[in-house]
Image (cartoon, rainbow, N blue to C red):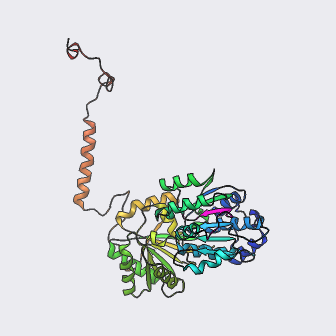
Amino acid sequence: MNTPTFEELDLSPELLKALAKKGYTRPTSIQQQTIPAALEGRDVLGSAPTGTGKTAAFLLPAIQHLLDHPRRKPGPPRILVLTPTRELAMQVAEQSEELAQFTNLKIATITGGVAYQNHGEVFNTNQDLVVATPGRLLQYIKEENFDCRSVEVLIFDEADRMLQMGFGQDAETIAAETRWRKYTWLFSATLEGELLVDFAQRILTNPLEIDAEPSRRERKKIQQWYYHADNLEHKTKLLARLIENFEVERGIVFVRRREAVRELSETLRKRGIRSTYLEGEMAQTQRNQSITRLKEGVVNVLVATDVAARGIDIDDVDFVINFDLPYSADTYLHRIGRTARAGKKGSAVSLVEAHDYKLLGKIQRYTEEVLKPRLIDGLEPRTKAPKDGEIVSVTKKEKARIKKKKEDKKEATKKKVKVRYKDTKNIGKRRKPTAEQKGE
């Protein structure tokens, strides 16, 4: 089945022109499913990993709605997009402006970390689409500086993270304040978790549920492989050599623990590799500095955890490196989706210790792809990879012990006494009490 073009999705010439300028030719899976449903007036509950074109999936129908139903005179915002962080709000607003560049639509942001007077233009001038963070927006709603009655479409981006960050009550209040809206679209990394399910049930009406994993065709643009590592020291050496050998220009290295982020970044710097890092509790200015340094080529590598990297949007990432494999195969897809974006190619490499092979197996089953091992000259592993979940490189004594255990178990099975049916047929049934038990 051929992928439809953007023209076939009934988008306006202004939007098609903007998409062509950005180099987008065909819609991604999430866009194919979301745009028609959203334009038909359905509520949408969508799940899509990073790098699947999720932001454009809700912005395109939102802007198209404004173009299809122009208002007679200017007024308050008609589209409201809520994001969990200021950083993500700025990225969504930037993409909105790019997509709406050939229209007369006005885009604005309302976020924390910005002085009140700088939001004056949002309150005093006409706006069509506003991207906001819940806390600051709710403050302005309570002060009656933001008019919710004109909002026609309410969009939640990264709703799962919004709830995890404690914005659930604020988000529900905003949903109540915008009760005159026509449609609600909610997007999340996954559609799991009691918090998210309850929240979605309360604010959505008969939604179309879309679970869009990147297609295998899209993933083929990402070359994937792994290296077997003996231990942490060996893994660190592999990482440094990998970055040097492939001359990584813009790479993201993922670790599991936030305590390891700064330490690994420092280790790479000592080896002459220009790197920076992202931590979950960094100040916004520090986060922005780290991201800008990678974008501008001041550093080549950004070390981060999954939580810290949520919401960042960096183009032209040529390598995603899993220093630690994620526990979830879903998270693996999120990570590698940060490379090979907008039709470009990229690489995703994993460093796998013996105890990681079960996770590797889970990832391969989930993605339906086989990741092949590679070697780096001079850094070949001394241990062998596991076989069927068990370490092959065990001692002879251990092998003999395992063999004897299996033989003993087999022998014990043979010696089991055969139990007759009549001895078992009454097990589990209530028996009639005897005369002695009755006290007779």
Viewport quadrant of the N terminus: bottom right
Whether residue 157 is situated above or below residue 104 in the rendered picture: above
The residue under the point 32% across, 27% down is 428
Left or right: residue 27 versus residue 263 is: right
- Is residue 288 covered in magenta? no
Indicate the position of residue 302 as horizontal and vertical percent values.
46, 79
Report the magenta stretch's main SS. loop
The residue under the point 63% across, 51% down is 205
Indicate the position of residue 242 as horizontal and vertical percent values.
44, 79
Q: Is residue 5 visible?
A: no
The residue under the point 48% across, 65% down is 332
Indicate the position of residue 172 as horizontal and vertical percent values.
55, 59
Viewport quadrant of the C terminus: top left
Whether residue 427 is situated above or below residue 338 in the rendered picture: above
Magenta residues span 145-158
Total labels: the figure holds 0
User: Which is more toward the observer, 26 or 194?
Assistant: 194
Q: Is residue 116 visible?
A: yes
Q: Residue furthest top?
A: 440
Indicate the position of residue 417 as horizontal and vertical percent values.
25, 31
User: Which is more toward the observer, 229 or 183?
Assistant: 183
* Residue 35 occupies quadrant: bottom right
User: Which is more toward the observer, 291 or 124?
Assistant: 124
Left or right: residue 351 versus residue 203 is: left
Q: Residue furthest front?
A: 143
